[in-house]
Every structure is written in structure tokens, then in C-alpha cells.
Amino acid sequence: MEGGIHPADSSAFRECFSLAWKNPYVLRLAFSAGIGGLLFGYDTGVISGALLYIRDDFKSVDKKTVLQESIVSMALAGAIVGAAMGGWLNDRYGRKFALLVADFLFFIGAILMAAAPNPSVLIVGRIFVGLGVGMASMTAPLYISEASPAKVRGALVSTNGFLITGGQFLSYLINLAFTKAPGTWRWMLGVAGLPALLQFVLMLALPESPRWLYRKGREEEAITILRKIYPASDVEAEIEALKESVEKEIEETGSSEKINMIQLLKTRTVRRGLIAGVGLQVFQQFVGINTVMYYSPTIIQLAGIASNQTALLLSLVTAGLNALGSVVSIYFIDRIGRKKLLVISLIGCVLSLGLLSAVFHETTSHSPPVSAVESSHFGNITCPAFTSAGPSASWSCMKCLKGSDCGFCASQTDKLLPGACLIENKIVKDTCHGEGRLWYTRGCPSQYGWLALVGLALYIIFFSPGMGTVPWIVNSEIYPLRFRGVCGGIAATSNWISNLIVAQSFLSLTEAIGTSWTFLGFGVISVIALLFVIIFVPETKGLPIEDVEKMLEERVFQLKFWKKRTPVVKKSTQV
């Protein structure tokens, strides 16, 4: 099978789902391991809603943007360590063991978060969850990729992406379900332990990756599993290709066990694979996706939606679109290929981020004015900064909210008319609501708020099928077998480091330069990412894993990606 390309067209999608009755064993492997993606997605989504209520319970969190960012980003810091550890664990002890460790860490973290008496314990729980998520994020797609037939490998690894986005959607449903329950955010965060427990139980009954077993000298176990995965007509060719791959490693290095990091970087195929794989993971975060997922309720409030519940409900729509985009990816990934999906995805991201930037510029520059009459109506709860500015001061809602610990109470008749600038606390908020007015602390009322929702929706629709899933698919299939765990760990670690940088800086950036300029910056990065994909990312559609290495060696990256690749006739293998 060396040099062979499995044609991957629209039949790949149908064949993937036909596995439900043709070979349910493969689907069971994919979906059981894919629960790791569900953990990843649930944690990404749940914190965005929980943060709204954590701020209400812990006043120190409400007053300090840095503390809010830390609660979000400490999970990312844990994920960086978890992904780095995961690469070593995967190569040393196997994919299955790494997933079991990830589930255990996630479960402990969920319990700590649910029981947290203060922000410090909450942050410790977030670190444990991050360790588990980081480990699972690089192990799950790797396990699925190594246990999938080449023709449907992209679609099956995309199920991991679907479960990531499905986990995000589920988290918003859970957030909405517990908005009225006592302990709101504790339930939201504690429920996260259930999928971890489920995957732990399921993985105990599943085998190790056949490719990992073969490389470790456990050929009989590997062959037994491969016979369950592949049709009888293909299994001998797959075994022979795997055997040749391992023998080539031993011939080049003298051992299939020891991994020399210097040699890893000097090996041309590995280096080229890392440039593509790490680059995709970094750009996946720097085009801004997780600011949308972590902070989508906050972004919606910045667009002028006042209610926590309404912000969560609208965030549910974005999460649903994200999940829908993953289904689209499953259909197209083996039909039109990885590279075309990435290019289409990034062009859409550039356009939608441009729209978001324009909308937020209009929202901030045309916010309702503050009326001295409206403010004095509330007596001694008027914002001190506004009072001290004097009657001649020209204040808008945005100026009221910036740096003065004050909130904006909208006009009774029309939220776009002049309103009152008042002290920000719960009593004042209730007083404002008591008069049938809307209370704003994150963003201001705007006639353009609905356009922000359109921009967010378009961004998700374009991002999810391409940049949302393809980087994980490419990283699960682009590296030589010997280095797959380590390189996958490096790429996943770079993803989480980038994620941490973006999450830790987003709210601070919006305060420093404004939401409009922040989204414009993400748009510029998306243009750079588009050029990177066209130049450095190869098309791996339909290639057996062992043949991807040959393509990297020859650097056949197909710059004219829109042209159909001529399939190489599969060579017969004599046994």
C-alpha cells in the first residue's frame, strides 16, 4: 500500500455513518475517546456563564478584571502542563493510559470547583481541570486517528471536534438550567465531573492504539485490533505498511524506543510537520475563537444586552451554531479536503471580524448621553464621579461605565434616550429595575446590538467547520509514528499557551484599546493565518498515515490547492 491514496469523496461521509452497522467497533472507539473532546468543550463553555454568577457571589472577583481573567486562564495554564505531560505519557504508557489519567484529574478538579469556599480554591480546581483537558485534547484525536481506516479518518477525528462543540452547547444548556437554582455556578462547574467519570469507565473496556502497540513490540495484540478495524481485503496491506514504518525507524535510529529531541528537530519530515501543525494550533487561538466561547455572554453585554439570562440564552445560539459547524466539517473534511476548508474558514473569519469591529465602534461612539435630571431623580445614589464633574460636563453611557465603579440606568421610555449614571451595587441595580428600567454595567444600550449578534453568528459559522476542527485533524495524522505523541504534545501545548495569552489579555485589551480595535486585531491575524495555510499546510486528504511522511519528505504542499490532486495508483504489496 506504500504510495497509495485512498480516494476521499462524498462517499466517505456515507461510509463513516455506515460503520454504525458495518463495523460498530470503530465507532465505539471513536466516540468513547471523543468524550475527551466533550470535556474540553464543556469546560470552555461553562466558565463563560458561571463567571456571571461567580462575580455576584465573590465581590473581589466582580471588582477585579484580573481575577476574572485568572479564573478563566488558570485552567489554560493547567492545560499547557497537561498537554506537555500528555505527549510524554502517550509515547511512554500509551494513549489509553493518558486518557484515564486525564479523566481522573478532571473529576478531582470538578469536585474542588463545586465546593470552593473562596476564589483561591476555585482557581486550584480550575488548574486540575486544565491538566485533564490539556491531556485529553491531544490524546483523543490521536487515539481516534490511529484506530480509523484512512478513507474515513478525517470524518471520525471530526467527531472529536463535534463533541468539543457539543460540549460547549451542553454547557450553555446546563448554565441556563441552573440560573434559578441555589448555588448556580457550583452546579454548573460540578456537573463537569460526570462525562469524565463516564469516559473513565468506557475506556477501561477499550483496547490500546494498535499503532502504539506495534511500535512497542506487541505485534500480536496490534494485529488483532487492526483485524477488527479494517475490512479483510485491506488489513494485510495495513499491517505490512505499519511494519515497514517501524522497521524504517529502527534502521534510521537504531531503536524504536528512545526519542532524541535534537534529532526530532533535525529530521526534515518532523520539522516540516511541526511548522504546519504548531502554526495551525497557534493561529486557531489567535484568530480569537475562545474569546467568543469564554466571554460570549460578556461580549453580548458589551453590545448592549443588559440581562444575564438573555446574554446566556443568546450565547446558547452561538454554541449551537458551533456544534452545527462541526457536523458540516464531518461531511466536507474527506470530500473537499483539509486545506480548502481552512482557506474558506479564514476568509469568512476576516469578513465577520471586520463586521464586529465596525459594530462595536458604532456602539461605543454613539452611546446614550447621561442626563443630570435623570441622575438627580435618584438622589444620593448618583455616581460621585459624575456629580464632581459639574453640571456642564458632557457624559455618555460609555464614560459613565469606564473607570468610575458606576452603572447606567436607562430611560424608562426608550433605552436610547438620556439615562442616569448611578453607583454600581446590588441595591442600586434593584432600585433601577424597580422603576422598569434596564441596568447596564458592561456595555451600553445601542440600536446596533443585533448586528453584533449577527457578526458573532457569522464568525462561528465560518470558524467551526475549518479552523475549529482541521488543526486537530492535521496534527493527528501529519507526524511520523515514532514522534506522533511528542509532536502532538508540542502542538497541543502551543495551542494552550496561545489560548492562555488570548484569554488572559482579552478583557484587558477591550478596556485599554476598546472592543472594536481588539476585534480588528483578530481580523489582521486571520489574514496572516490565511497566507500561512496557503504556503505551509499540506493536504492530507485520503492519505494513509504512513504515506503522509513521504509527502513531507518531498514537500508536496500543493500551493494550487483548488486543483484536484491526481491519485497515485496503489501498489500491490507482496507478502
Image: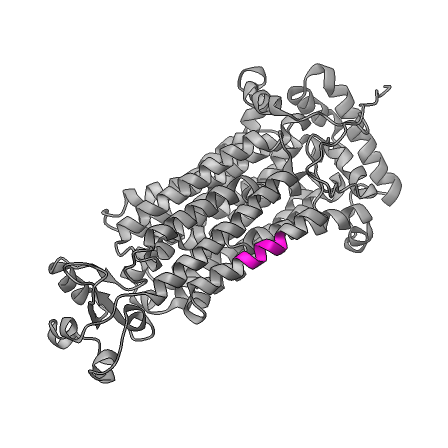
Q: Answer left or right for 418 relative to 505.
A: left
Q: Residue 398 location in percent, x, y?
A: 31, 69
Q: Please give the range of residues in magenta.
A: 523-529
Is residue 96 within the magenta segment?
no
Q: Quadrant of the N terminus?
A: top right
Q: Looking at the image, can residue 94 be seen?
A: no
Q: Residue 259 location in percent, x, y?
A: 77, 48
Which of the pair 500/189 is nearer the observer?
500
Q: Give the mark count.
A: 0
Q: Is 396 rendered above or below residue 140? A: below
Q: Residue 526 location in percent, x, y?
A: 57, 54
Q: Looking at the image, can residue 554 be seen?
A: yes
Quarter of the rendering containing residue 439: bottom left
Q: Residue 270 location in percent, x, y?
A: 77, 47
Q: Tell me the chief SS of the magenta region.
A: helix
Q: Answer left or right for 327 relative to 46.
A: right
Q: Is 63 rendered above or below residue 238? A: below
Q: Is 239 rendered above or below residue 451? A: above
Q: Answer left or right for 434 relative to 271.
A: left
Q: Residue at x 33, y 50 (%)?
A: 450
Quarter of the rendering containing residue 295: bottom left
Which of the pair 105/187 is nearer the observer?
187
Q: Residue at x 59, y 20 (%)?
A: 15
